[in-house]
Image: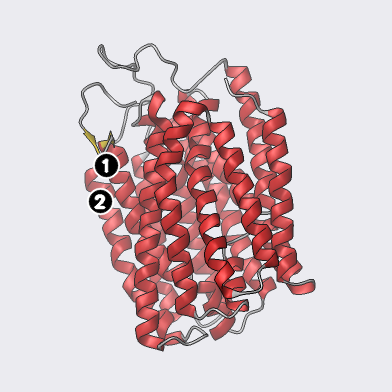
C-alpha cells in the first residue's frame, strides 16, 4: 500500500515508476528478438504455421502454470521482489541461446524458458504494483506500467526495424544473419532491467493500513464482501478464457502482414505503430476506469478488438493494415491495464498474488488451444478464418461480461 507522504514520480509511486522502467527495458529486448521469431521459423528454418502455433501455444500455455505458483508463493512468503528478480533473470539467460538455434526444437526450448521466466515474475510484479498504489489510483498505476512496457516495445521494434533494414536493405524475408544481429543487440537491455529491479525497487509490506492524513484512509483495500468478490473473480476468469481462446499469438498478425506483401522492415514498423497507440492509450484508459468503472472500459476495448480482427480477416491491401494495427493497439491500451486493475477490485488484499497468478494462468493456458486452433484454421481454410474466429469469441466474451459480472 502506498504510504502517506511518499514522493511520487510522474504521478505514481516510486516502485511503480521503476517497475515501469524494468518492463520498458525488458520489452526493448524481447520485441527486438521475439517479434521476428515467427519469420525466422518460417523464412529460415522453413517451419509451417501449425508448428509455429504449437510453439507459441506450448510456451505460453504450459509456462502459465508457474504464474499461479509464483503468485501463491508471493502471498505465502510475503516476498514479491525476489520472485520477480528470479523470473526476469531466467528470461534474460535464455535469450542468448537463440543465437545458435538451428532447429525449431531449440527455438521451442528457448521460447519456453523465456515464458517460464515471465510466468514466475508476472503475478508477483503485478501484486507489487498493487501493493505500492492507493486503492483509488489502481487504474492509473497499471495504466502507467502498461504504457512504459509498451514504450519499450516501440523502442525495441524501431531498433529492430533499423537493424533489419541495414542488414537486409528491405528484403521480403528474414535472414539468419539479421536474426542473429537482433539477438545480440537485445541482450544488453534485458541485463539492465534485472539490475534496475535489484537496486531500485523495494519490497512492500502487504495490507498495511494507511497512515493518518492519507487521503485514502478508510477506503476499502480493493475488496468487497469476500464471497461476492470470489464469485465475481471466478466468473471474470471464465470470461477471460473465452476471450483468450480467440486471441491467438501475435505471431499470426506478423504472418498476415507478410501474407499481404509487407517486407520484414515494414512488418516491424507496423508493430511500432501498434505499440505507440497502445502506450498512448494505456494510462488515460486506466484513469477513466478509476472514475467510471472497469467493466465498461473493458467492453469498449473488446469491441475494438473484434472490429480489428474482422478487418484483418477482410483486408486485401497493405494500406489497410496500418489502420487495423492502430485499432489493435487501441484495444490493448484500453483493456490490458484496466483488466489487471479489475482483478484488484475483485479480491481481498491478502490474496492479490494468488489472484494475479490465477489471472495470468487462465489467460496463458488458454493461449495453447487458441494458438493451435489459429494455426490449423489458417492451414486448412486460410488466414481469414483465424481472424473471424477471434472476432466471434470476443463477441461472446463481451456478452458474458455485460450479463454476468456486476461492479461493486
Position of residue 312 relative to residue 103, above or below, is above
Viewed as shown, does residue 391 lie left or right of 274?
Answer: right
Q: What is the spatial separation of the Cα atoms under label 2 and label 1, in whole angstroms?
A: 7 Å
The structure residue drawn at horizontal position 32% and vertical position 73%, both measured from the top left corner, is 185
Q: Is residue 358 visible?
A: no
Expressed as whole percent of the image width and height from the top left, the position of residue 76 reads: 45, 31
The image shows residue 55, relative to residue 216, as above or below, that is below
State the image coordinates of residue 385 (x, y, percent, origin top left): 75, 65
Tell me the residue at 38%/44% (across/down).
145
Q: Nearer the viewer, residue 13 or 200?
A: 13
Q: Secondary structure at mark 2?
A: helix
- Disc with the residue nearer the chain's start (2 vs 1): 2
Residue 194 placement, left or right of 353 = left
Q: Quadrant of the C terminus?
A: top right
Instruction: Report the label total.
Output: 2
Q: Quadrant of residue 253?
A: bottom right
Q: Which mark is on residue 201?
A: 1
Please give the name of the residue rendered at 67% of the width and 44% of the height, measured from the top-left corner: 241
Left-right relation of 71 to 203: right
Residue bearing mark 2: 196
Label drawn at residue 353: none
Q: Position of residue 85 (x, y in %)?
A: 34, 49
Amino acid at each position: 500500500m502506498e504510504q502517506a507522504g511518499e514522493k511520487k514520480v510522474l504521478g505514481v509511486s516510486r516502485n511503480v515508476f521503476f517497475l515501469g522502467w524494468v518492463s520498458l527495458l525488458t520489452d526493448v529486448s524481447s520485441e527486438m528478438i521475439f517479434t521476428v521469431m515467427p519469420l525466422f521459423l518460417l523464412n529460415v528454418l522453413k517451419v509451417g504455421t501449425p508448428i509455429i502455433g504449437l510453439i507459441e501455444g506450448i510456451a505460453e500455455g504450459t509456462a502459465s502454470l508457474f504464474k499461479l505458483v509464483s503468485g501463491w508463493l508471493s502471498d505465502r512468503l510475503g516476498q514479491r521482489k525476489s520472485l520477480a528478480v528470479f523470473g526476469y533473470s531466467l528470461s534474460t539467460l535464455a535469450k542468448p541461446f537463440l543465437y545458435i538455434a538451428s532447429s525449431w526444437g531449440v527455438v521451442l526450448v528457448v521460447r519456453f524458458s523465456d515464458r517460464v521466466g515471465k510466468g514466475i515474475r508476472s503475478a508477483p510484479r503485478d501484486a507489487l504494483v498493487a501493493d505500492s498504489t492507493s486503492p483509488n489510483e489502481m487504474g492509473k498505476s497499471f495504466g502507467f506500467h502498461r504504457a512504459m512496457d509498451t514504450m519499450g516495445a516501440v523502442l525495441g521494434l524501431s531498433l529492430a526495424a533499423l537493424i533489419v533494414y541495414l542488414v537486409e536493405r528491405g528484403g521480403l524475408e528474414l535472414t539468419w544473419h539479421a536474426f542473429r544481429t537482433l539477438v545480440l543487440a537485445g541482450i544488453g537491455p534485458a541485463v539492465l532491467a534485472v539490475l534496475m529491479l535489484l537496486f531500485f525497487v523495494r519490497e512492500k509490506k502487504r495490507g498495511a493500513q494507511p497512515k493518518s492524513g492519507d487521503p485514502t484512509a478508510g477506503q476499502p483495500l480493493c475488496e468487497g464482501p469476500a464471497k461476492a468478490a470470489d464469485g465475481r473473480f471466478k466468473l471474470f476468469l471464465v470470461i477471460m478464457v473465452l476471450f483468450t481462446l480467440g486471441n491467438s499469438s501475435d505471431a499470426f498478425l506478423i504472418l498476415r502482414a507478410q501474407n499481404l506483401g509487407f517486407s520484414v522492415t515494414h512488418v516491424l514498423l507496423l508493430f511500432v505503430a501498434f505499440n505507440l497507440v497502445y502506450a498512448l492509450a494505456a494510462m488515460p484508459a486506466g484513469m477513466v476506469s478509476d472514475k467510471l468503472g472497469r467493466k465498461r472500459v473493458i467492453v469498449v476495448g473488446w469491441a475494438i478488438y473484434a472490429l480489428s480482427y474482422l478487418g484483418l480477416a477482410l483486408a486485401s491491401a497493405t494500406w489497410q493494415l496500418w489502420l487495423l494495427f492502430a485499432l489493435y493497439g487501441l484495444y490493448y491500451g484500453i483493456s490490458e491495464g484496466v483488466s489487471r486493475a479489475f482483478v484488484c477490485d475483485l479480491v481481498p488484499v491478502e490474496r492479490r498474488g494468488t489472484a494475479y497468478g490465477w489471472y495470468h494462468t487462465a489467460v496463458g493456458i488458454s493461449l495453447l488451444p487458441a494458438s493451435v486452433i489459429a494455426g490449423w484454421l489458417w492451414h486448412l481454410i486460410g488466414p481469414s478464418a483465424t481472424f473471424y474466429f477471434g472476432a466471434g469469441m470476443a463477441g461472446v466474451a463481451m456478452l458474458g461480461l455485460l450479463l454476468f459480472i456486476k461492479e461493486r
